[in-house]
Image (cartoon, rainbow, N blue to C red):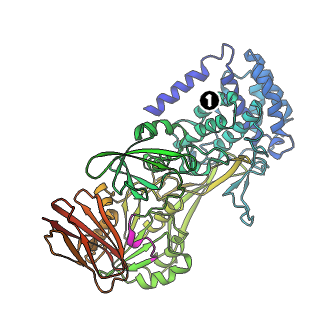
């Protein structure tokens, strides 16, 4: 109902005042649509026989100064006449595509009453005589090029202006040309326009006027980010950045957050006083909800999971060496305040310390594990040879893989099978697509995997990672465990507005063989599992634990997370405890936490015995965690 309401409001706003003089906003909206339509469909303009950018910049002053509807149509007539005569087609247009492959070929707006009959006739002539042909403005990518730009390239629109906007801020009409170019690229070549929260037409209408009044680089960049936010695509967010102005900020304090149990929770910290499991209350006097509300208009995200993931960094972001005040709730429920500095730029976090650096392993319960972030293509044969006789293999894709799902499928699939179908843009016929059915595997594979495939995913699972989930899910006995993924699948096309502003978008539509989409929805788990704040405090990987439970693994990391394979004595204790480690441990990290997960002691040791003074601890129960090459072990003792 919300989408329909927005659309109706938009239609009312744009279409009910044409008996009056059109507003500048309306004139720019229709000029952008007319200019882009002619660019891609006019026989001479689409072949670059006309300097179409120059025509636009020359016509925009006439459009701005047009007062009446006739004045505006005269300006459009000037633009259309500059395109020259349209070639008249001698053969009918092949139009046998199903509706889902021509969603972006929508010309109903040509009949809007703002257009005078002579202008409408010119537009209809272009529409009716267009025939698919080579277009100079858009090409399939030449993958032999050392500069990879994605599936599509835009030879005359990348960059749209060949200089730095920050150093040489363009005038109003050049800024409008940039936005006209960008909007029309997305309008004709984004396969997911039908899935947007706000119609792409509405985005143009609602955001075009501020471009005319932005007085500097920062204002223009923020206005552009408001446009890209409505693409609802994490790929757009990742691809959109400025060389000078980074919004909201690149650097963070030396902590990492994740959104867990409806809170922004510290999962890594190198800031004294802030511990894993602490919950963020406010940053620089703004609550996390206030940060979300202030940043949401600028952020392109397909679903709430990826939005929250982005906020984990954005609420902390700022300029290098700037100060930050963090208010947080510790494990005892106390609100604490910490002042720190933004100096940290990366955000590497993996929820399992003992498995973060391995490529694959096999547990005693005959269950295999593969960390897809670390597995290389050259490792795949060796990995499968070691794990092919296991009862289950857990593939962890809570990360970004190295393209190994393809060779894994060829080894493990029992036969050749389709795991997805794609919509491929037709560069000769803007706004339309063709289906491509993606298959892997041998026709018959006697060495196929017969065990249970378990795939781990979460909000970190993005793009190729989501596609890898689809590949592995096509196995006969596969289960996905975890939570909603980023919902940004498919190849990316990237390009530049200027030398200092970059952007891009998802340009292949990705669907399951039955036609279900992954865009914005993400990979849907068969078994939903989330981390908890308590699990973070105690070093548990609850998503992996769920997978091991499904795999019926009784000798595993899950068990080691609960089992004490070292000794603590005396227990109960008065003043000191001795922690005795296995002789096989070469180096161990030992921590002591209270029942609320607050870290009270931490030390690395190469000895197999460590004496710890606990005399200052209040009476109660305490947990000891040992991390070494044998895994993670947790024990407890009582302080009298």
Residue 484: x and y in percent read 41, 54
Look at the image and give the residue range highlighted in magenta: 351-359
Whether residue 100 is visible here, answered yes or no, is: yes
Residue 519: x and y in percent read 50, 51
The residue that label 1 is drawn on is 205
Quadrant that contains the N terminus: top left
Instruction: Count all numbered tags in the image, as a single digit.
Output: 1
Quadrant that contains the C terminus: bottom left
- Taking the magenta stretch, the answer to whether it contains residue 356 is yes
Image-based side of 279 in relation to 563, left or right? right
Camera-side residue of 513 and 3: 3
Residue 254: x and y in percent read 47, 56
- Local crowd size for mark 1, using a 10 Å CA cut-off: few (<14), some (14–19), many (≥20): some
Query: Principal SS element in the magenta part?
Result: loop
Image-based side of 619 in relation to 28, left or right? left
Whether residue 127 is visible here, answered yes or no, is: no
Q: Secondary structure at mark 1?
A: helix
């Amino acid at each position: 109902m919300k989408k329909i309401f927005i659309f109706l409001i938009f239609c009312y706003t744009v279409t009910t005042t044409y008996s009056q003089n059109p507003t500048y906003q309306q004139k720019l909206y229709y000029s952008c649509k007319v200019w882009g339509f002619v660019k891609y469909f006019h026989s001479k303009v689409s072949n670059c026989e006309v300097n179409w950018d120059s025509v636009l910049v020359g016509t925009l002053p006439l459009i701005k100064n047009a007062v009446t509807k006739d004045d505006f149509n005269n300006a459009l007539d000037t633009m259309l006449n500059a395109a020259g005569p349209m070639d008249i087609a001698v053969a009918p247009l092949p139009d046998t595509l199903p509706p889902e492959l021509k969603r972006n070929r929508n010309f109903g707006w040509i009949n809007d009453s703002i257009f005078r009959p002579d202008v409408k006739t010119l537009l209809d002539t272009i529409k009716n005589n267009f025939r698919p042909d080579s277009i100079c403005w858009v090409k399939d990518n030449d993958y032999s090029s050392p500069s990879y730009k994605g599936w599509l390239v835009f030879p005359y629109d990348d960059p749209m202006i060949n200089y730095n906007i920050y150093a040489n801020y363009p005038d109003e009409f050049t800024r409008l040309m940039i936005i006209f170019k960008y909007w029309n690229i997305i309008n004709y070549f984004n396969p997911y326009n039908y899935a947007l929260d706000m119609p792409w037409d509405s985005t143009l209408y609602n955001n075009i006027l501020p471009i005319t009044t932005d007085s500097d680089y920062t204002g223009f960049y923020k206005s552009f980010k408001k446009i890209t936010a409505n693409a609802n695509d994490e790929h757009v967010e990742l691809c959109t950045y400025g060389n000078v102005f980074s919004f909201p900020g690149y650097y963070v304090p030396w902590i990492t957050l994740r959104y867990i149990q409806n809170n922004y929770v510290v999962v890594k910290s190198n800031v004294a006083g802030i511990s894993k499991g602490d919950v963020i209350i406010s940053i620089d006097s703004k609550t996390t909800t206030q940060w979300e509300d202030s940043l949401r208009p600028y952020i392109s995200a397909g679903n709430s999971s990826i939005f929250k993931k982005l906020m984990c960094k954005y609420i902390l972001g700022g300029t290098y060496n700037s100060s930050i005040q963090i208010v947080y709730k510790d494990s005892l429920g106390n609100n604490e305040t910490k002042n720190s500095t933004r100096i940290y730029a990366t955000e590497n976090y993996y929820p399992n310390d003992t498995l973060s650096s391995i490529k694959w392993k096999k547990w005693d319960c005959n269950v295999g594990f593969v960390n897809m972030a670390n597995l290389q293509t050259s490792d795949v044969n060796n990995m499968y040879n070691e794990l092919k006789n296991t009862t289950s293999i857990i593939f962890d894709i809570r990360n970004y893989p190295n393209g190994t799902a393809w060779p894994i499928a060829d080894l493990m699939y029992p036969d050749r099978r389709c795991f997805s179908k794609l919509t491929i843009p037709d560069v000769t016929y803007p706004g339309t697509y063709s289906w491509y059915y993606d298959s892997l595997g041998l026709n018959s594979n006697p060495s196929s995997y017969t065990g249970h495939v378990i795939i781990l995913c979460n909000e970190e699972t993005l793009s190729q990672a989501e596609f890898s989930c689809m590949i592995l899910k096509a196995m006969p006995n596969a289960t996905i465990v975890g939570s909603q993924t980023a919902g940004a699948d498919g190849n990316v096309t990237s390009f530049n507005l200027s030398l200092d502003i970059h952007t891009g978008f998802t340009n292949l539509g990705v669907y399951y063989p039955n036609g279900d989409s992954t865009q914005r929805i993400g990979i849907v788990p068969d078994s939903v599992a989330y981390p908890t704040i308590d699990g973070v405090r105690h070093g548990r990987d609850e998503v992996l634990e769920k997978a091991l439970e499904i795999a019926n693994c009784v000798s595993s990391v899950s068990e080691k997370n609960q089992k004490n394979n070292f000794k603590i004595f005396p227990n109960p204790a008065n003043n000191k405890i001795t922690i005795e480690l296995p002789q096989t441990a070469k180096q161990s990290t030992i921590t002591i936490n209270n029942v609320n997960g607050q870290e009270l002691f931490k030390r690395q040791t190469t000895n197999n015995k460590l004496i710890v003074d606990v005399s200052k601890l209040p009476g109660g129960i305490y947990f000891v965690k040992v991390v070494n090459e044998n895994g993670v072990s947790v024990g407890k003792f009582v302080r009298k």
